[in-house]
């Protein structure tokens, strides 16, 4: 059942002045449409919308790309290469591994580095029960490329617990539960203040309101739902109205310990030290030395 803001009389006919569902509220203010978006969160959305996920993935990618290395022939002769381009490629590979559990690199002679990243969403695997992976198909729109593994395209997979061939889940997918908690807390807090720091309220009239009063109240509600600038406007009515506030206070819903715990578990999934993200954790670690 969708939550609603009910405005009605307390007489026997229970006349409803206005019933607003979440969909109706979204029409009044687009922010309300974000209240239920945590359900079905994708890895791309988690990376794009949750700062903690973005920071954890970025730290891993930059850390891997910053590792020192040299490229040599089989006889140990150093090979010259574009270090910046290769570091950028390594960074993109780690990001793909975090999001999709797989990364694909095309051998491309036309590229200055000779290697080009392929987006994992464009890749389909073809495998044989006896021979294993036999082909990698890349599809962009209506165009397809059938590539030979290793010879045409290099690949890196996260281990899979469900199959012998193919990538396992990326770290972002593993952390989606905690990511939903963090996103829900962010959205609830943002929506709360965008609504003028108002909780859902039931408005009870002593008698059936007139059409003029209904119109004034509806207009006032729309202004109140418009955000902080309109939160303190008032409306004049000719009868007493009783209000009943629904839900808990913001401080009760967004308990700091619960939100912090979800954030900590998210970082555990990425293997990122909390001291690199939270100043409080860094201060605690310093104090313990």
Image (cartoon, rainbow, N blue to C red):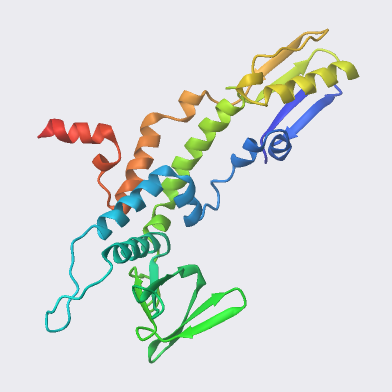
Task: Examine the rendered structure and indicate whether residue 182 appears above or below residue 86.
Answer: above
Q: Quadrant of the N terminus?
A: top right
Residue 48 spot, x, y in % from top left: 48, 50
Give the total number of marks visible in the rendering: 0
Examine the image and state in which quarter residue 241 appears.
Answer: top right
Farthest bottom residue in view: 130
What residue do we see at 26% from left, 31% from top? 280
Is residue 96 rendered to the left or right of residue 36? left
Q: Quadrant of residue 19?
A: top right
Mark yes or no: residue 11 visible: no
Is residue 21 among the parts visible in the rendering?
A: yes
Residue pictured at 9% horizontal, 35% vertical: 289
In this rendering, position of residue 42 left or right of residue 198: left
Q: Residue 105: give x, y in percent of width and height.
A: 38, 74
Place of residue 276 in the rendered image (x, y in percent of width and height, measured from the top left):
26, 42
Measuring 40% from the left and 72% from the top, which residue is drawn there? 116
**Residue, x 35% and y 51% (percent of image)?**
58
Q: Is residue 90 above or below residue 46?
A: below
Instruction: Give whichever of 85, 21 is nearer the camera.
Output: 85
The answer to whether residue 285 is above or below residue 251 is: below
Question: 39 or 97: nearer the eye?
Answer: 97
The extreme left residue here reads: 289
In which image quadrant can residue 223 be found?
top right
Task: Measuring from the top left, give residue 22's x and y in whole percent.
Answer: 68, 37
- Position of 75 with respect to 166 (left or right) is left
Q: Is residue 184 left or right of residue 35?
A: left
């Amino acid at each position: 059942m969708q939550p609603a803001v009910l405005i009605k009389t307390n007489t026997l006919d229970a006349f409803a002045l206005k019933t607003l569902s979440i969909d109706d509220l979204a029409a009044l203010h687009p922010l309300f449409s974000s209240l239920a978006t945590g359900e079905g969160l994708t890895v791309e959305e988690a990376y794009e919308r949750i700062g903690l996920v973005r920071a954890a993935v970025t730290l891993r990618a930059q850390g891997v790309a910053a590792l020192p290395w040299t490229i040599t022939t089989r006889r140990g002769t150093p090979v010259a290469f574009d270090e910046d381009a290769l570091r950028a490629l390594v960074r993109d590979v780690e990001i793909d591994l975090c999001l999709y559990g797989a990364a694909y690199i095309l051998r491309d002679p036309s590229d200055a580095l000779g290697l080009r990243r392929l987006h994992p969403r464009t890749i389909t695997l073809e495998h044989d029960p006896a021979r294993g992976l036999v082909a990698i198909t890349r599809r962009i729109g209506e165009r397809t490329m059938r590539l030979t593994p290793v010879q045409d395209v290099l690949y890196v997979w996260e281990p899979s617990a469900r199959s012998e061939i193919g990538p396992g889940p990326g770290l972002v997918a593993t952390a989606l539960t905690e990511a939903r908690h963090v996103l829900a807390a962010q959205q609830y807090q943002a929506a709360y203040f965008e609504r003028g720091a108002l909780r859902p309220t039931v408005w009870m009239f002593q008698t059936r309101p007139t059409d003029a009063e209904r119109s004034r109240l509806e207009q006032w509600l729309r202004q109140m739902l418009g955000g902080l600038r309109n939160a303190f406007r008032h409306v004049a009515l000719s009868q007493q109205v009783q209000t009943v506030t629904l839900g808990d206070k913001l401080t009760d819903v967004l308990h700091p310990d619960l939100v912090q715990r979800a954030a900590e578990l998210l970082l555990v999934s990425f293997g990122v030290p909390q001291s690199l993200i939270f100043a409080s954790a860094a201060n605690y670690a310093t104090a313990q030395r």
